[in-house]
Amino acid sequence: MQIDSISREAPVLVAGPTASGKSTLAMALAARDGRLIVNADALQVYENWRILTARPSAADEAALPHALYGHVPRDAAYSVGHWLRDLAPLLSRPVVIVGGTGLNFNALTRGLAEVPDTPPAIRAEADARMAAEGPAALLADLDPATAARIDRMNPVRIQRAWEVLRVTGRGLASWQDDTPAPLLPLAQAEALVLLPEVAWLNSRIDRRFRQMLTEGALDEARANLPGWDAKLPSSRAIGGPELIAHLRGEIGLDEATEAAILASRQYAKRQRTWFRSNMKAWRQLSLP
């Protein structure tokens, strides 16, 4: 990839679907400009996954400075707000911020509503309703403004909106309308989103997951088996639930592999849709 046209001075943001080559581009920019590589992926923050979340290798981290990778315990809550607070002091130096979590980039460049956290009792109530009734029931309880705005295909966001309304008596849309100024306005950054050709990306996803197995992803999942809790945010690492199911004797390794690859492709499709809808002002790079 040619990087000559990418700014040497402005903070660079690199978004894109899983396996699209974001980290390779970020490392090239960091090497060229002396930038710190900052993680914007919601799962690469967790210490218990390196291989399965495609976190930079130990060798990559030794070669170039990285931040906000693997610094959160597996059972800890870590929100977009936590990420912004950890990121803020890093913006005093040249950075390339890279990841596939669009909500992090939205919060960074558009601002983040300061919504109160959900108490454990309300979270347990929401979890129970989600398990018994599904996201449609929680969606039906939302205020009209939030229901009209929310991603109806994302049960995690639906549950969070329900919790906000339950805790505060105020819809999430109302909180969002009071969003403070962003930490890094989009106009002050070089914002890039990678949008690869679908067949090319699917092939990369297939190869990468099989390479992860070669590199020890099954052993990594085995280390996560004691105390495994599917409700933890860290347990959403794609491939994690599938490999855990294999280790529990519920499915064979081939079946787990195919299921994980399919889940990765579906996730990439959701990411592409989200980026096209929410990042129209970003510079789009088509690969290959």
Image (cartoon, rainbow, N blue to C red):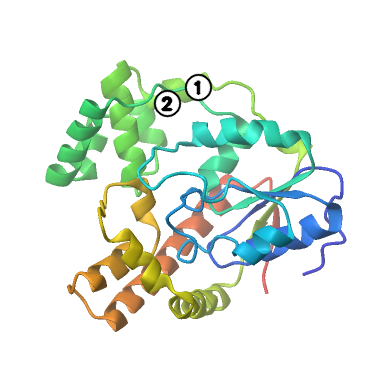
For the C terminus, give its image quadrant: bottom right
- Residue 266 figure quarter: bottom left
Q: Which mark is residue 150?
A: none
Which amino acid does the dot numbered 2 rest on? Answer: Ala
Residue 48, image x, y percentages: 42, 55
For image coordinates 50% across by 74% down, the residue present is 205
Measured along the vertical axis of the image, is residue 69 above or below residue 267?
above
Residue 184 in view: no
For image coordinates 77% across by 33% down, the residue present is 92
Measured along the vertical axis of the image, is residue 69 above or below residue 261?
above
Residue 37 in view: yes
Measured along the vertical axis of the image, is residue 166 above or below residue 218?
above
Residue 44, image x, y percentages: 51, 53
Q: Nearer the viewer, residue 93 or 143?
A: 93
37 left or right, relative to 99? right
120 left or right, relative to 287? left
Residue matched to label 2: 173
180 left or right, relative to 265? right
Measured along the vertical axis of the image, is residue 206 above or below residue 221?
below
- The residue lying furthest to the left in this view is 132
- The residue lying furthest to the bottom in this view is 254
Residue 272, image x, y percentages: 53, 59
For image coordinates 51% across by 51% down, the residue present is 274
Which amino acid does the dot numbered 1 rest on? Answer: Asp
For the N terminus, give its image quadrant: bottom right
- The residue lying furthest to the top in this view is 169
Circle 1 — which element?
A: helix
Residue matched to label 1: 177
Q: How far apart are the alpha carbons under marks 1 and 2? A: 6 Å
Circle 2 — which element?
A: helix
Are the residues at dot 1 and dot 2 in contact (C-beta closer than 8 Å)?
yes
